[in-house]
Image (spheres, grey):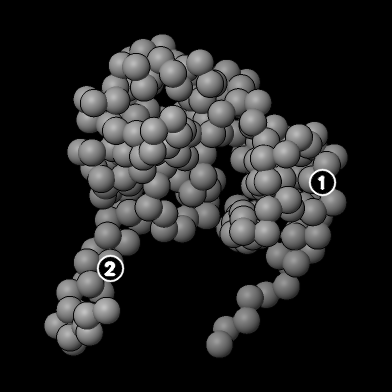
Amino acid sequence: MEELTAADVDRRTDALLEEAEAYFMGEGGVHAAAAAIAERLAEAGIDYAIAGAIALGEYGFKRLTVEVDVLIRREDLDRFKAEWVGRGYRDVRPGGKAVRDTVNNVNIDFLLSGDFPGDGKPKPVAFPDPRDAAIAGERYRVLSLPRLVEMKLASGMTAPHRLQDLADVLRLIRAAGLPRHFAAQVDPYVRGKFEELWLAAQHPEDDY
């Protein structure tokens, strides 16, 4: 591995800080990619909901991300790919769900209605139909707050490599001031985990 010089480290740090600043200002490649995919889907009459970290930001908890998560129906993903792959988008891998926005150099990760979050195995919580689970935001349609929390809880509960999803819910509870009775709005399958995280969120964060 080539050894980095101090100048290399400075350049990389500056680039990362510039990217983070743009993201938190609602600018930069990730937000441009989200706006572009939302526009393409809306023009095609395809129902969708922006999910993931961008949706978290809409509800008050902002964290940096390098991709765009989009909830869509399986047949509509096929429609989108038939129209747009090769025209500003390319498959990340043949036959896969994700595409790469080649203009903004950002991955678009599609979540398919009916699939199961986390470990992918059948469970009481599945990715919903965007027709039933999307609400209009300022720039695009986003996954409703109860369904976003539900999906993240189910994911973090069943996939050891998805613990970030539980951390997201914990931080969202704090940032958005979610009340304990919000648990009634999510599926019983994940309700206990929400209450556990809600109790944890009541402890002040340590300031080291």
Say whether residue 97 is left or right of residue 133: left
Question: Looking at the image, which is closer to me, 156 or 31?
Answer: 156
Q: Amino acid at mark 2?
A: Leu
- Quadrant where the image shows the N terminus: bottom left
The residue lying at 74 percent from left, 53 percent from top is 157
Q: Position of residue 84 (x, y in %)?
A: 29, 22
Measured in 3D between alpha carbons, the distance from the residue under mark 1 to the one under mark 2, in whole angstroms, is: 37 Å
Residue at x 23%, y 26% (from the top left corner): 86
Q: Secondary structure at mark 1?
A: helix
Whether residue 72 is situated above or below residue 68 in the rendered picture: above
- Read off the residue under disc 1: 191
From the viewer's side, name the closer residue of 2 and 106: 2
Q: Which of 63 and 138 lies nearest the eye of the viewer?
A: 63
Q: Is residue 78 left or right of residue 175?
A: left
Residue beneath label 2, please?
Answer: 17
Up the image or down, 65 lies above or below 10; here it is above
